[in-house]
Image: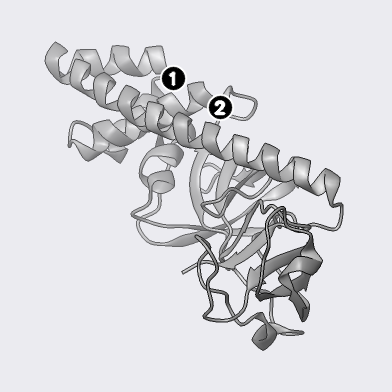
Amino acid sequence: MNVRVQAKGHANLDSFPFRFGFYFNKDSTIELTNVKNRGSLSNDNRYPVDANFINPKNNKLEKGRFILLADKENTIITVWCLGGESKTEMLLSETLRIAREKGDIDSDDMITMYSKKVRGHYDLIKYLSEKLTAEEVVKIEEDTDARVERISHALAKLAAENDELKQQNIKHPEGITNSLNGRFKILSVEVVSGMSLHPPKKWSGDMQRVTTDYGVGIDNLPNISYGRETPGYDWSHHIGGEPMYGIRISPSDADYPWIKKGY
């Protein structure tokens, strides 16, 4: 599996130098092997995998937990320690990012940390304390805690939404689920009456029933909106075509979840 490394991205500037002792000077591609434990797609179009790769600096086989963007190039967002606890890894990752963004350290500093076996959050703070003032370190920790709290809140909200969607799919087993790679093929589109979808309230208008390779979803008619839902998208243009990206799945009160085209 080939994945893209953005030269100016967090993975290249923080994750790779700190965890593996290297970074690229330009956008690059690496090959992931033994890819497994692929997680579900998040609402922001990301998914995790465990995988191996060859370290380009020393040709050593490395292992990591990769967070990938479900785009055509599988762009790497970040890399965590394989088997690490997610909040601990997030705290470490965000501390590195914030310290770099403040100009307190750079990627070469992180390679130095790697060579000195600075691995965990405690070791990182100890290293920063030797390089920076106490006030600068405290500010980094405060900013990191605030960012991690925001991310954790967003992840908790997403988990709740996914649990709701799972319950709906238990009730309606044909309901569409998130694709593992962020891509959906549109197989067919039918225009059906809103009431045929058994909503709890009266739906007077017609709806689109969209069948994909990951199940069935519903949408408003093209450019028409009912209630708070956004106007529908004309899915018929993609029947039998190339897989689509940027699709959002969310619970509905009817037989099937909503399927929405991201903008």
Q: Position of residue 88 (x, y in %)?
A: 49, 21
Specify how the rendered protein is coloured. one colour
Q: Position of residue 18 (x, y in %)?
A: 41, 32
Q: Quadrant of residue 181?
A: bottom right
- Residue 116 vs 52, above or below: the answer is above
Q: Position of residue 84 (x, y in %)?
A: 59, 23
Mark 1 Cα shell of 10 Å, populated few (<14), some (14-19), many (≥20): few
- The disc at residue 86 is 2
Disc nearest the viewer among 2 and 1: 2
Decide if residue 255 is on the left or right side of residue 220.
Answer: right
Q: Secondary structure at mark 2?
A: helix
Residue appearing at x 75%, y 42% in the figure: 166
The mark nearer the N terminus, 2 or 1, is: 2
Q: Amino acid at mark 2?
A: Ser
Mark 2 vs mark 1, CA separation in Å: 21 Å
Per the image, the residue denoted by label 1 is 117
Residue appearing at x 72%, y 53% in the figure: 200
